[in-house]
Image (spheres, coloured by chain):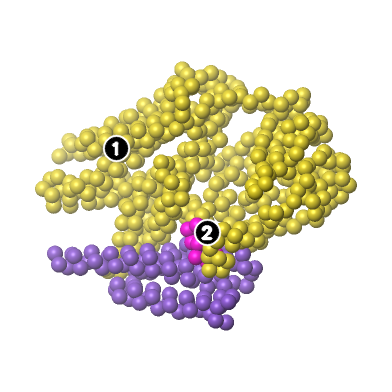
Chain colours: A yellow, B purple
Amino acid sequence: MKEGFRQSMAWLHTWVGLLVGWVLFFVFVTGTTGYVNGEISRWMQPELPLPRQLIEVPPEQVLGFAFDRLEQVAPDARMWSVTLPHRGLAQRTDREATIAWEDMPRPGLERGRRGNEGFDPVTGAPDQPVEGRATGAGWELYEMHYALHYINYDVAFRIVGVCTMFMLLAIISGVITHKKIFKDFFTFRPRKGQRSWLDAHNVISVMALPFFIMITYSGLVFYTFQYMPAVKNVVYGASEKHLRQLYDELFKRDPVDKAFEAVKRPTASVPEMIATAQTAWGKLPVATVMLRHPVDEGAYVEVIGDTSESLNRGFPPKLRFNAETGERMTLDDKTNASMLTRNVMLALHEGHFAGWWLRWLYFLSGVLGCAMIGTGLVLWTVKRRNNHLAKHGGQPGFGHRLVEVLNVGTIVGLPVAVAAYFWANRLLPIEMANRAEWEMHCLFATWGWMFMYAALRPLKRSWLESLYIAVAAFGLIPLLNFLTTDKHLGITIPYGDWVLAGFDLTMLGFAAAFAYMAYKLKKRWLKQEAAA
Amino acid sequence: MKSMTRYRWMVASRILAAVVVGYALASAISILLALIWPIPKAEAVLASTMLSFAIYAAVVLWVFATKSVLRAWIGLLIPLAIISLLCWWLMPGGAA
């Protein structure tokens, strides 16, 4: 901080990075699982049936079944919606025929009770809900990347916000530190100790730099008004009412006191409306029709397009028709530049729009983020170890030792803990009370145990042995799955269920990666000992 | 040893300036931006709030890059005062 600009930025990068490195590592690991949330959740509920093959059914047949059923289950509803079976453009998942509804809100409440139900589009029979095991599934796992766990939500997302701001600072100061960032990118000096760690850290960081900048900044945008409340507080006011007014203006929402009548089966032809929309949209599939009956506007049907490939998050293309005459109604669904910017940033963060290839790239970028933080943390200790040993007479000081233990316990310990979460899903008794909570307790108990282990063993031993544990923890998951369910690789690969098979295969991939790390470290340390 | 203690106090002072006063300055700049941005009010509030994180980052980097701690404090407090006054003046119901 004393000398030049670049030195002060290097100083800032080092300390900002160290201070929040472990929290950020946790955020990156759990956040990355969010890109495969659906797949993880599916794997964690093996009772659910293998997916139905998508069949083309004329919309009038699907709608007929849907309206019959909705009249039965939701006769006094503020909203009806019918999802037509279709394949999203991004091809993440096939959407099956589903109805959903919202009852009239009870007096004093803003929203009514919601319900939904799948059905067979050929026979019209409602799906019998399959009771899967109680599990936190992928949801609980990835929600921790902004809500943490065991901590009050309002405190948690602020902690994550502060760490995210630190991450932004670390990225910018990290880039400034390198005067020759392009040259550094092509520099890798293996087997040179500290230099190799530095080069690895540089290469990984630059490789996915656009992703890191995007994911960090867009992460802040999720809580825009919570992290920086000053602007809205000054311009609009700090009360709930003022916040509501701001949101109403931004989202063009209906005012709270808008009156609705119960939705009835439309008299105009909905399939014709769908055909109109389909002509207007070309290859974009029609996803859903939604019905409402506001007193002032009259009953209407909205035909909503598939948004799986859209970057304008939450704003699908839609057409509105009068439910009695079938006439097109004008609909102001244009958004403004500020909202569009926000929507695109959030969509980029979540990656829902991404098809298979891009989603693997997201996943890989997330893993690279873990690697960037991991190599940075290790670099801090490698750089200082010899100095510390000299200063403290051959023994690392407490601070240094603490960082080393936290590094092993987090970089290898956290992945092991996540594996334990999957083990718990298969091994805890199905009928257990609070089963979903106990899956999470298993994760944190395992993590705590990995920290203890790292603290009690000599540094090199704890690295190697933790890595061996990780290899076993991930590598045995497909076997565990084989022993405890009928949805194992022997079934899922022949059936072509790549969601389930992909999970097991990815676990094997992680086991291989940890095994490779252990092998490299061991070989290197043996050589060092031989030289010494 | 004495110079080490002094150095640590300097660092602490800079951290305080960057984190707390820097946040205040970033807030003030964003408010000013929202008030003068010629688009509908709600959109201006959203846009300038989204930008505030970049402004905050720039302010913090400057605090750590500038030559002396004194310069950092002066460089934060004077713009903060001026911009706050401007905001107050531009506010609906303010001085203007």
Where does the C terminus of chain A fall, quadrant-wise?
top left
Image quarter (top left, top right, bottom left or bottom right) of the N terminus of chain A: bottom left
Q: Nearer the viewer, residue A90 or A426?
A: A426
Residue A353, given in percent of the width and then of the height, sits at 61, 45
> Which amino acid, by three-letter code, is at mark 2?
Phe
Instruction: Establish if A450 lies above or below A433.
Output: below
Q: CA distance from mark 2 to mark 1?
A: 36 Å
Majority secondary structure in the magenta region = helix
Residue A318: in magenta span = no
Instruction: Pick whichever, A243 or A66, lies toward us.
Output: A243
| Residues rendered magenta in the picture | A225-232
Q: Residue furthest left?
A: A393
Q: Amino acid at mark 1?
A: Phe
Answer left or right for A154 relative to A296: left
- Quadrant of the image occupied by residue A113: top right
Whether residue B53 is visible, yes or no, is yes
Q: Nearer the viewer, mark 2 or mark 1?
A: 2
Of B20 and A29, which appears nearest the observer? B20
Residue drawn at the location 66% of the way across and 24% of the way down: A128
Q: What crowding class fits label 1: few (fewer than 14 Cα within 10 Å), some (14-19), or many (20 or more)?
A: many
Disc 2: host chain: A
Q: Which residue is mark 2?
A: A225
Q: Would you identify the image quadrant in which residue A445 lies? A: top left
Q: Callout 2: few (<14), some (14-19), or many (20+) C-alpha neighbours within 10 Å? A: some
Residue A14, horizontal then vertical, whole percent: 31, 56
Contact check, label 2 and label 1, Cβ < 8 Å? no
